[in-house]
Amino acid sequence: MISIPAQAEVVGKVRTDWVGNDIVIEAIQDPKVQGVTCHLTYFERSLIDRLQQGNWFEDPSNSAIACQTTGPVTIGEIDLDRNGEEVFNEGRSLIFKKLVVNRIYDRQNNTLVYLAHTRQVQQGSAKMSISTVPLYSVQATWTKGRPQ
């Protein structure tokens, strides 16, 4: 089954200094879980900062994520193994670095876990952020029945 990655919509931008560096806030709708929205933030370097610091072709690996139910929850065919599945990715460098969001289903606690991290070809980053969406308090509908 081919998975279509989520699309991000910029909902805010906060200037952090006089050279034009920004914190960007994006809203991401999980393509397989209707009613869940994640807000992802990351740092975007300005042209002036790139000139001053060098390293022209990439942004920092820092990110944060917060996910909530934003409507009735309908869960499609999601990957239920411990590795979960990638629901979003966005380039953070010219070629090799991507900001990624993975979804993992915590069966024991009936909770969706969203992990934001950076994936690189080498020298992977340990900078990450997680958010959880407990399903016990919402009327979640599973398209194929809730896994046991």
Image (cartoon, rainbow, N blue to C red):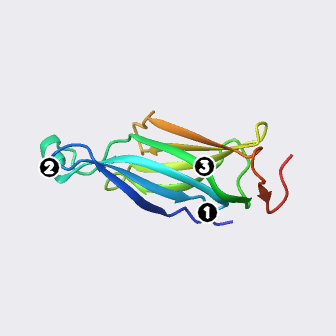
Question: On the picture, is 143 further left or further right than 134?
Answer: right
Q: Position of residue 126 (x, y in %)?
A: 45, 33
Count of numbered badges drawn on the protein: 3
Dot in front, 1 or 3: 3
Q: Position of residue 59 (x, y in %)?
A: 31, 47
Kind of residue at badge 1: Pro
What is the spatial separation of the Cα atoms under label 1 and label 3, in whole angstroms? 14 Å
What's the residue at 16%, 45% (across, down)? 18
Q: Nearer the viewer, residue 142 or 98?
A: 142
Res 10 quadrant in image: bottom left
Q: Are marks 1 and 3 in contact (CB under 8 Å)?
A: no
Q: Earlier in the sequence, mark 2 or mark 3?
A: 2
Q: Earlier in the sequence, mark 2 or mark 1?
A: 1
Q: Position of residue 68 (x, y in %)?
A: 60, 49
Question: On the picture, is 35 further left or further right than 24?
Answer: right
Q: Position of residue 108 (x, y in %)?
A: 79, 37
To which residue does mark 3 refer? 68
Query: Could you say whether the residue bearing mark 3 is in a helix, strand or loop?
Result: strand
Q: Nearer the viewer, residue 137 or 141?
A: 137
Number of the label disc, if any, that sits on residue 6: none
Dot in front, 2 or 3: 3
Query: Could you say whether the residue bearing mark 2 is in a helix, strand or loop?
Result: helix
To which residue does mark 1 refer? 31
Crowd around label 1: few <14 · some 14–19 · many ≥20 (10 Å): some
To which residue does mark 2 refer? 48
Crowd around label 2: few <14 · some 14–19 · many ≥20 (10 Å): few
What's the residue at 54%, 52% (across, down)? 38
What is the spatial separation of the Cα atoms under label 2 and label 3, in whole angstroms? 36 Å
Kind of residue at badge 3: Gln
What is the spatial separation of the Cα atoms under label 2 and label 1, in whole angstroms? 36 Å
Instruction: Please identify the quadrant where the N terminus is shown.
Output: bottom right
Kind of residue at badge 2: Ile
